[in-house]
Amino acid sequence: MKQKLINFFEATGLTWFVPIIRLVTGEEPKEQCTEIFKMLGYPAIALALFFMTWGYLSTKIKTSVGALPSPTYVWSQGEAMWATHNSETVRKSEAGELEKVRIKFNTLVTERRTLEENGKATEPVDKKLDKLLSETKEKAELYTPLVEKYATIKEKAEKEKAEEITAIREKFTKAGKFDLDDSGKPKIDVDGNPQLAEEALDEINYKQNFRVAVYEGNLVRVYKSIQGSYRSLINKVEKIEKYTQIARELASVSPSTGHDKKVASNNRKRQAFEKQIAKPNDYQGNGSIVDYIKLSIITVVFGFFLAAFVAIPLGIVCGLSPAIMTALNPLIQTFRPVSPLAWVLITIQVIDGIFVGDNALQGDILKNTFLHSGITVALCSLWATLSNTALGVSSVDQDHLNVAQVLKLNWFDRIFKIIIPSAIPYIFTGLRITLGVGWMVLIVSEMMATSRGLGWFIDQEYQNNKVESLANIMVCIFIIGIIGAILDRIMFTLQKLVSFSDEVSA
Amino acid sequence: MSNYVKEHYLDLVNLSKVYPTKKGPFVVLENFNLTVPEGEFVCLIGHSGCGKSTILTMVAGLNSISNGSVSVAGHEIDGPGPDRGVVFQSPSLLPWLSAYDNVMLGVSKVYPHASKKEREDIVKHYLNAVGLGGAFHKMPKELSQGMRQRVGIARAFALKPKMMLLDEPLGMLDALTKHELQDLIAKLHAEHKLTTLMVTHDVDEALYLSDRVVMMTNGPKAKVGQILLNDMPRPRERVSLLEYPNYYKYREQLITFLEEQELKKKHTAA
């Protein structure tokens, strides 16, 4: 068990876990502690220095939108993003529930229509509808206490924040830190009070920027809007019930002048509402950081496989035939250094030319924009795999080729049993670089292609032009970096698994 | 098989190897003649660069023949083939295949009509014979140098070759492992009586294994210097060998020859 864990961490390159495991199992505690300090202590010191420098700089550097976000502020924005993700999840599930109720109503109403047309009794369906209607009414009212509950929390948090800001204001007022005019008197603000000095305003702004009770605040909006939708649904069903009732009354009285007209007009109204509840409501989510991350990862994996799919066979062909390599080399050398910014524009035009108008891709994930960014990733990242595969195939160990000769292997076996297997470590080295480049290129291609991943989100935030957005971008930078590192770890592990020796550069 | 073929089982006739260089042709080997009767174990010994490995790779078909001919069992060779088992200095196992699969690769090539079970038995038999009974499914990187070379030997023998070509197969091993593998080679030779050509520069190894030791002069244009008929009785044992009256005489003859060549080399260099 212990050895297995150690092997696992060594295989994945997470070697800093190894001394911890040894320590836990009581193997030479002193030595392990030194080891842990070396592996965790040094990075911890570096991280601490980094955050201190960042924290210091954030008080000194002014950006065009305000002070540079501090580490704590960026962290709080990260939490706010997570809160938004959670409230979006609630919205999604609530919207799903609502849709189920609508479908139930619609089924019953349609069922009743059919029964009526066939001249059958409708009482059981009427009863069911009544029951469902009263249940739904109850359900809709359940949101009121929820809204109140979360609104109270939100208000309380807002109040506390306001108090803290007032406290800061008072502190500076007491200390007499005012913005002075030429004569040395404090300038007067629009609200009639003396204007505080810049450092005071900075501190107030800093406090002001922190968002409080984000989750609760979002839930208040979510529940209110869901309640509204329930009420509107109930309203429609009640209208249908009303017109159904009228239709029945009209059917029971003896025909008189204008009777037919009344019946027809009543029926039209009833049908109009029935149509409304028959229409499916697409849940239009705002998306959350988790959705962006998911799409980005799916896109990069798509681009990665596309690159591998093109580059590996081409690389093998180039490696096998010096003539083809010489032929393709100028093209490879020309296209390799091209920026993703250039590729993405061409990709957009080409893809939009193929999937145009009604043919535009409308899938949950498979949209035109997804292809734009995915193909750009592939175009920019395939070169590393291509050249590494070609190198691996062309530099097969002479000993291995001798084996093939002695065994008189045919062309097919030579390639598939000797050459390709022996090139696999090279191929995986290439794939690791490809994934790294792909992830780097992805962000900019998503920006340009407006594919709703992390790159798109960063661009949106940039357009918002607020300190808050700057902090959100910084959160994204950390997310991008961490995911990139994890992807590289995965490739490192694969690379190590397929390598014939134990030396793989971390 | 005719007696002639038996007597000339491996026949090198006027074998030459010329490498074209910018300064004109470089003659490694010129008119080299050697005849090995069936079942004989011949060691080629000489200083490095004398072309002994060139001869071996030419017999294996891995190196083109500039002039002359090589015939094995009465047929002139044309390129490499599984009828001549080769053990290289480095084990040159395919690192992505297990010991078992490395041997199986050749076996399934040489016995295309055998059933799966038969092939498996062949592979297992030879791996057992080289003492790797417990390491069938180990990857080369998990095996020691000596064990890898054992796989290399098993792979060569499993092809049921007409003859064996050993190119300094024990050159990279430590003394103890070397002894073990020398014993293994001696044992396999005793069992299979395969005609064997072995390149070495280890005098004791040559004496322990061979029936004849062919001493080569320095290159370029290397030729056969002396031939030592090693008539020490088989089966040989390392310890009793030392007591054999001619052992030291043979050893001296070999060493003296090599020393002379060494001196000549220095002389030419000076």
Image (spheres, coloured by chain):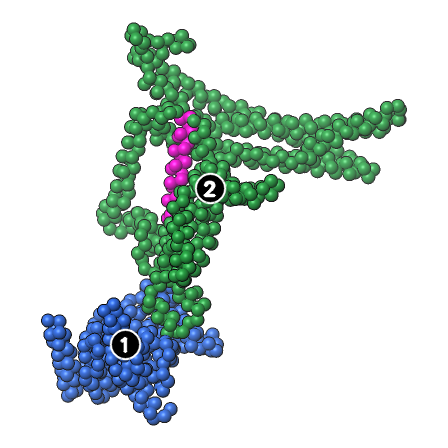
Chain colours: A green, B blue
Q: Read off the chain for label 1.
A: B
Location of residue A115 by image quarter: top right
| Residue A474 part of the magenta segment | yes
Q: Which residue is labeled 1 in the image?
A: B17
Q: Which mark is residue A109?
A: none
Which element is circle 1 on?
A: strand
Where residue B142 sits, quadrant-wise, is bottom left
Image x and y of residue A423, in percent: 38, 60
Q: Residues within 10 Å of mark 1 (few under 14, many from 20)?
A: many
| Residue B45 visible at all | no
How many angstroms separate mark 1 from mark 2 (CA)? Answer: 58 Å
Nearest to viewer (mark 1 / mark 2): 1
Residue beneath the point at 32% across and 48% down: A17
Question: Is residue A304 left or right of B34 when viewed as pictured?
Answer: right
Residue A54's place in the image compared with A375, above or below, is above
- Label tally: 2
Residue B258 percent location from the top left of the image: 15, 78
Q: Amino acid at mark 2?
A: Val
Identify the residue at horizontal 58%, vertical 27% (top origin). Answer: A225
In the picture of the structure, the residue carrying the numbered disc 2 is: A344
Stretch in magenta:
A466-491
